[in-house]
Image: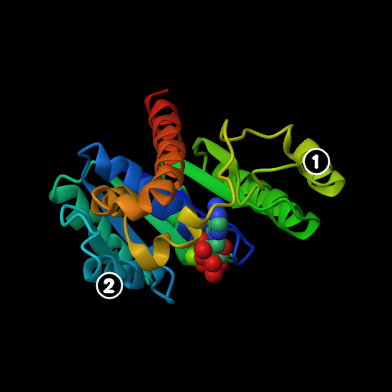
């Protein structure tokens, strides 16, 4: 089982959304995904509840509450024993012993960031913190920055200079764009199932195209993560 974690010091950086999207991409390929809910606000549990009410939850995907160390350990053991292909951990913002343990146990780390100066500053601090933590534990875990909520259209000068600041760091090759399809995932459930449920609805044809574009981007994110895990 491969543990992939989204983390950042900054609240609202897009961790949970990136994780939900990655979960949808992997699940749509028939992978079994365990979700470690390490944020006491339990956004993934809410996601599942909303998804079930819209028939947009794949039952092969399971949530494990992991908001305390003993729960995390139990979740890890159980998910591994049950043969999940991936565990995706959604952390709370900031640093904690729980987050440190998750980071040190991961095979791949994703630090999402929006392109504002405050967000990029926090992303750089998170990245440095991760590197120091791994170094102190003598671990090598690949970590990448995911540019999150990037406008589809023209970027402002400030956003472009933030991109320049990130250019030195390992990046997910494509950003996650600011899209309704991503913003509404938390209410609508897994994107690929949302697409399936919408497919027969002629009135939704244009909306469907937007969902499909967003899904293709998530699939690319899934392939990027898989390639990184194989290396
Ligand atoms: N690519 C995106 N396109 C549009 N909206 C997005 C995107 N990514 C995140 N959002 C929205 O931004 C807000 C914050 O995202 P999210 O909850 O994923 O951040 P987070 O880092 O998990 O926050 P927290 O620190 O509170 O856990 C949410 O309302 C979400 O719907
Ligand atoms: Mg979150």
In x, y percent, where is residue 18?
47, 51
Q: Which residue is mark 2?
A: 49
- Give the residue at x 68% y 47%: 128
* Residue 96 visible to an observer of this rendering: no
In x, y percent, where is residue 177?
58, 46
Label 1: few (<14), some (14–19) or many (≥20) C-alpha neighbours in 10 Å: few
Above/below status of 9 relative to 199: below
- Give the residue at x 85% y 48%: 158
In x, y percent, where is residue 195?
31, 49
In the displayed image of the protein, which residue is found farthest to the right?
157
Q: Quadrant of the C terminus?
A: top left
Above/below status of 107 relative to 79: above
Judge by depth and name the residue closer to the eye, 228 or 49.
Answer: 49
Label 2: few (<14), some (14–19) or many (≥20) C-alpha neighbours in 10 Å: some
Relative horizontal placement of residue 163, taking residue 15 as reference (left or right): right
Identify the secondary structure beneath mark 2. Answer: helix
The mark that comes first in sequence, 1 or 2, is 2
Ligand 2 within 8 Å of disc 2? The answer is no
Q: Quadrant of ligand 1?
A: bottom right
Q: Are marks 1 and 2 in contact (CB under 8 Å)?
A: no
- Give the residue at x 24% y 54%: 197
Q: Quadrant of residue 32?
A: top left
Judge by depth and name the residue closer to the eye, 197 or 34.
Answer: 197
Q: How is the image coloured?
A: rainbow
Judge by depth and name the residue closer to the eye, 181 or 208.
Answer: 208
């Amino acid at each position: 089982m491969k543990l992939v974690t989204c983390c950042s010091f900054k609240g609202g950086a897009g961790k949970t959304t990136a994780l939900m999207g990655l979960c949808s991409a992997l699940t749509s390929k028939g992978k079994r995904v365990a979700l470690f809910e390490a944020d006491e606000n339990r956004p993934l549990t809410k996601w599942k509840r909303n998804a079930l009410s819209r028939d947009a939850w794949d039952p092969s995907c399971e949530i494990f509450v992991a908001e305390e160390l003993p729960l995390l350990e139990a979740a890890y053991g159980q998910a591994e024993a049950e043969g999940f292909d991936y565990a995706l951990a959604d952390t709370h913002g900031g640093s904690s012993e729980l987050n440190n343990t998750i980071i040190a146990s991961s095979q791949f780390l994703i630090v999402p960031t929006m392109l504002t100066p405050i967000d990029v500053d926090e992303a750089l601090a998170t990245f440095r913190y991760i590197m120091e933590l791994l170094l102190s534990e003598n671990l090598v875990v690949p970590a990448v920055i995911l540019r999150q909520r990037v406008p589809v259209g023209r970027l402002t000068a400030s956003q472009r200079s933030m991109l320049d600041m990130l250019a030195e760091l390992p990046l997910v090759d494509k950003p996650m764009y600011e899209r309704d399809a991503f913003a509404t995932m938390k209410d609508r459930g897994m994107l690929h199932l949302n697409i399936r449920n919408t497919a027969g609805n002629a009135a939704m044809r244009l909306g469907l195209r937007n969902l499909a574009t967003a899904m293709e981007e998530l699939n690319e994110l899934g392939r990027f993560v898989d390639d990184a895990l194989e290396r």
